[in-house]
Structure formats: structure tokens, C-alpha cells
Image (cartoon, rainbow, N blue to C red):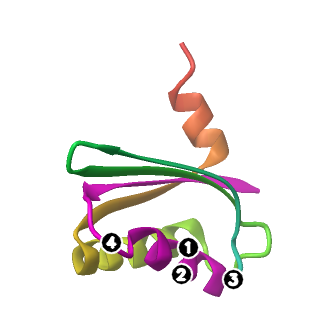
Amino acid sequence: MRAIVTVIGKDKAGIIAKVSTYLTQIGANIEDISQTLLQDYFVMIMLVDITKCNKKISDIQKDFDIMGVEIGVNARIQHEDIFNSMHKI
């Protein structure tokens, strides 16, 4: 089972480290990552395998909400099927 993680916020050091460390700790595997800076804004998308993850997506989102406040970003996770369904015409 895979999920899409998006992170958006003002750029600062340590955003990728914080998110990737958390995902590793819960047993998720980052399969692909893309990140860019749009002027001062940091934008990252990750494709994550959560098959061996020890948390539900809803619990990960709760942790992302807390993390987002701590590091000043908006972090979201969606199941890959939901993400794909939302982006079909």
C-alpha cells in the first residue's frame, strides 16, 4: 500500500530530515521524493510505501498536524488510490 505525502511551507533547514526521520521511525519506506523552492516556499511530494508501517494513515496525519505546527509547514498524507481518484478527469 502506498501513500502520497505533501509538505508545503516557508523554507527552513531540517524539513526533509524531520519528515523523513519520522517516516523511517514508523516503518514507512520513501520510494520517491521531489522537492523544490518557489521563492521562499518549500514544496515537497513523497511517494511512500506504508505496507510495513506501524500506524494508520489517520494517525500519521495527526502526527503530521503536530509536526507541522512545530516546524511551520502544512504536511498531508493521502492513500495513493484516493490521490489518484481525486486527480482523474
Most distant residue in the bottom direction: 25
Q: Are marks 1 and 2 in contact (CB under 8 Å)?
A: yes
The type of residue carrying mark 4 is Asp
The type of residue carrying mark 3 is Asn
Q: Is residue 28 magenta?
A: no
**Separation of residues labelled 4 and 2 (CA atoms):** 13 Å
Which residue in the structure is indicated by mark 1? 20
Other-residue count near label 3 (Cα within 10 Å), few / some / many at <14 / 14–19 / ≥20: few
The type of residue carrying mark 2 is Tyr
Residue 12 drawn at (x, y percent): 27, 68
Q: Looking at the image, which residue is at 64% across and 45% down?
A: 80
Which residue in the structure is indicated by mark 2? 22
Label 1's element?
Answer: helix
Q: Is residue 57 above or below residue 2?
A: below
10 to the left or right of 1 = left
Which residue in the structure is indicated by mark 4? 65
**Separation of residues labelled 3 and 2 (CA atoms):** 12 Å
Which residue in the structure is indicated by mark 3? 54
